[in-house]
Amino acid sequence: MTEFEDMTAAHAADIAAIESATFAEPWSEKAVAALAGESRAIARVLVKDGKVAAYYSMYVVEGEGYVNNLAVAPDRRGKGLGDALMRDMMYAASLSGVTALTLEVRESNAAARSLYEKYGFKPAGVRKNFYPDKENAVIYWLDI
């Protein structure tokens, strides 16, 4: 059984390490710690062997969830944790009254796009030159 828990500032160092290993512009440990205390956010972690193995966060505004980041630690990838993230995220969002989720993903990130589409997210547009390296972002939406 995969069990998630609410993110706290104590998880910030592990999450910042995953951010650095995953994203070109990672969130700092300080930014992650601040997010953990944000009243408008849903932020959850999966802890395995005393370390964060996966996490996600979103801001909730007027019934919509804007997904900031979700990631799996590099040494934990390929073990179904992406699916676990998606299921927990959608469940937590619905419990919070969220009726729609949105996110952006790199156009070239086929693995992430496939995961989002597997869970019903639909492409809804493109943000041209969204990333610092000028790669486009695909905007995804899901009505819950």
Image (tube, rainbow, N blue to C red):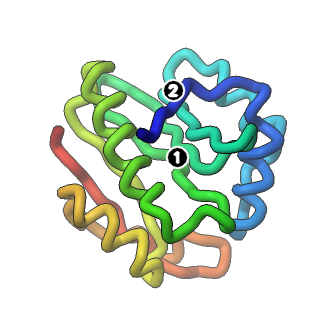
Contact? badges 1 and 2 (CB < 8 Å) = yes
The structure residue drawn at horizontal position 62% and vertical position 28%, both measured from the top left corner, is: 7
Q: Amino acid at mark 2?
A: Ala
The structure residue drawn at horizontal position 72% and vertical position 56%, both measured from the top left corner, is: 18
The structure residue drawn at horizontal position 73% and vertical position 27%, both measured from the top left corner, is: 34
Residue under label 1: 68
| Quadrant in the picture for the C terminus | top left
| Quadrant in the picture for the N terminus | top left
Q: Residue 52 appears in which quarter of the rendering?
A: top right
Residue 137 left/right relative to 126: right
Position of residue 8 relative to residue 13, above or below, is above
Give the label on residue 81, or none.
none
Residue 127 left/right relative to 43: left
Number of other residues with Cα within 10 Å of mark 2, as a class: few under 14, some 14 to 19, many 20 or more: some
Give the label on residue 41, or none.
2
User: Element type at marker 1?
Assistant: strand
Kindly give the residue lying farthest to the top in the view shown. Answer: 39
